Image: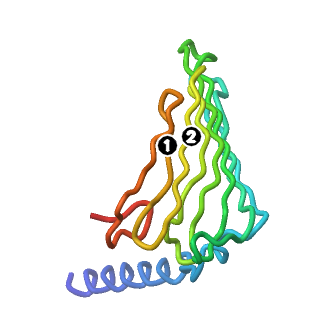
Amino acid sequence: MKTLITLLLLLLTFASASQAARSVKGFNSVEEYRTIGEFRLWTFISKDSVIGTYLSTVKEQVSINNQSGISFEQKLKLDYTKIGTNLTFNIVSRHFVAQDGMYLGDDMKIDINDQSEELNLKRDGTTLKGFITRNDSKIDQEIELGNIKFAVENN
């Protein structure tokens, strides 16, 4: 019985090690992961109807306040009227990320039904500066990030 358990443990260890050897390697930069010109398209389906798409394209190298990075063009279209809800989204944006993945900012136009808003934020050191609009009013923004580096941080 001990021999059987030992063989099972060895088999399990071998299987785990072989899976780890086949796992995806890490990337050293954003551009290594997604090259300029690459695009990805997602389609959203609900109740057997295509209700929208999301297109993400790596556009170009950029510099945001002396920090080099990559620009992503993103287009999200969702039309819930196809499934009986009076709601449409059309969001077009440029998303800026440094080569190490650090968040550098966004330039976004958001249309929800018949209302349009904008968001324009750029990183300057440890601060995000820019504006948002709300009901045709431009509201300046200055957000201190402290040591937050990425758009999404682990807590």
Residue 78 at x, y percent in the picture: 61, 30
Task: Name the image quarter holding the N terminus.
Answer: bottom left
**Quadrant (top left, top right, bottom left, bottom right) of the C terminus:** bottom left
Mark 2 to mark 1: distance in Å? 6 Å
Secondary structure of residue under mark 2 = strand
For mark 1, what is the residue?
A: 132
**Which residue is at 49% across, 43% downward?**
132
Instruction: Indicate left or right for 138 with 144 as reference.
Output: right
The residue that appears at 44% across and 79% down in the rendered structure is 15
User: Residue 152: percent from the left, percent from the top?
Assistant: 40, 60
23, 56: nearer the viewer:
56
Q: Residue furthest right?
A: 37
Above or below, 16 against 132 in this view is: below
Residue 53, percent from left and from top: 67, 38
Name the element at disc 1: strand
Farthest residue in the left direction?
2
- For the point 49% across and 65% down, the residue is 123
Structural crowding at the residue carrying mark 1, measured as other residues with C-alpha within 10 Å and reported as few (<14), some (14–19) or many (≥20): some
Q: Amino acid at mark 1?
A: Ile
Does the CB distance between marks 2 and 1 fall below 8 Å? yes
| x and y percentages locating residue 80 in the rendered image | 58, 21
Q: Which residue is mark 2?
A: 118
| Lower position in the chain sequence, tag 2 or tag 1 | 2
The relative height of residue 8 versus residue 88 in the rendered view (above or below) is below
Q: Nearer the viewer, residue 143 or 6?
A: 143
